[in-house]
Amino acid sequence: MSNSGTSSFQALLRRLSWKLALPLLMAALTIGLHYLDRAWLRAWGAWDDLAVTTARGLSVLLNGPGSFFAPGLKLSGQLLGVAIFWTWIGFLLDRRLRGIKTSTIRRIWLRVALHVVGLGVSCWLIWNVARFIEPATVRDLFKLPSIFLSNSPVRFLRGRDFVAIAEILWGLGYAIYFLKKLWLLRKARPTAT
C-alpha cells in the first residue's frame, strides 16, 4: 500500500467515532449470536440439560467483561453490559487515535485504586478458570479448532470451552494492561487535591 493510501486509511480511522461504532457493531453481533444460541438450545436442550452453546461461548469471547458481569440477564441486560464495555473501549481508542495522552482522571491515588481494582478483576477471571480446569480440559482446548470445524454435533455445544478461553484471554490481557498502567504510575507526580 502506498503512503497516500496508508495516510487516507489512518485519516478514516481517526474520523470514525469508535465510541459509537464499536458498541453498535458488537451489539449487532451479540444479537445475532443470541438468536443462534436460542436456536441451538432448542435443538440440543433435550440432549444436555446444562447446555452451553458455542454461540453463547463466542459471545462471551467477543464481549469479554461486558458479558461476564451480566451472564444471567435477558438480552436487554446483556446488551447494556456490551454497550457500556465497548463504548469505553471506543472512547479510549478515539483518544489514542487523536493523540490525546492526558488521563481523564487527574488524581493519581484514584487512578491507582481503579487500576488495582481492574487488576483484581483480571486475576479473578484467571482464577475462576484455573480452579476448575483439569489436564483433560486443557487437552480439549487444543483440540477445539478441529472439533469446531468437524461435522460432529458436539461442535454446537462447546460454549464452556469458549467461555474458559475468554476468561483466560481477557484476564491475561487486562492483567498485563493494568500492571503496565501501575508500573507507569509509580513515577507520576501527585496532583493537588
Image (spheres, rainbow, N blue to C red):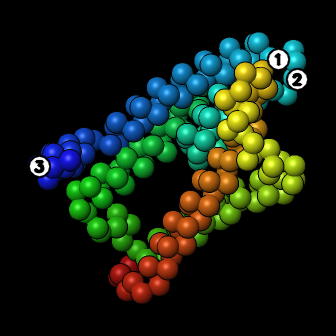
Q: Residue at x 49, y 45 (%)?
A: 85
- Quadrant (top left, top right, bottom left, bottom right) of the C terminus: bottom left
Of the residues tagged 2 and 3, which is closer to the observer? 3
Name the kind of residue labelled 3 in the image: Ser
The mark that comes first in sequence, 3 or 1, is 3
Instruction: Name the disc covering residue 45, or none.
Output: 1
Q: Amino acid at mark 2?
A: Asp
Q: Residue at x 34, y 52 (%)?
A: 93
> What distance separates the C-alpha of mark 3 from that of mark 1?
54 Å
State the residue at coordinates (15%, 49%).
2
Q: Amino acid at mark 1?
A: Gly
Query: How far is mark 2 from mark 1, CA to CA?
Result: 6 Å
* Comes first in the chain, label 2 or label 3: 3
Q: Which residue is mark 2?
A: 49
Dot in front, 3 or 1: 3
Q: Mark 1: give few (<14), some (14-19) or many (20+) Cα within 10 Å.
A: some
Q: Residue 145 at x, y = what percent?
A: 67, 38
Query: Label 3: which residue?
Result: 4
Count of numbered tags = 3
Q: Is residue 54 visible?
A: no
Q: Is residue 157 visible?
A: yes
Image coordinates of residue 161 in percent, x first then y, are 74, 41
> Image point 76% across, 12% down: which residue?
43
Q: Is residue 108 above or below residue 117?
A: below
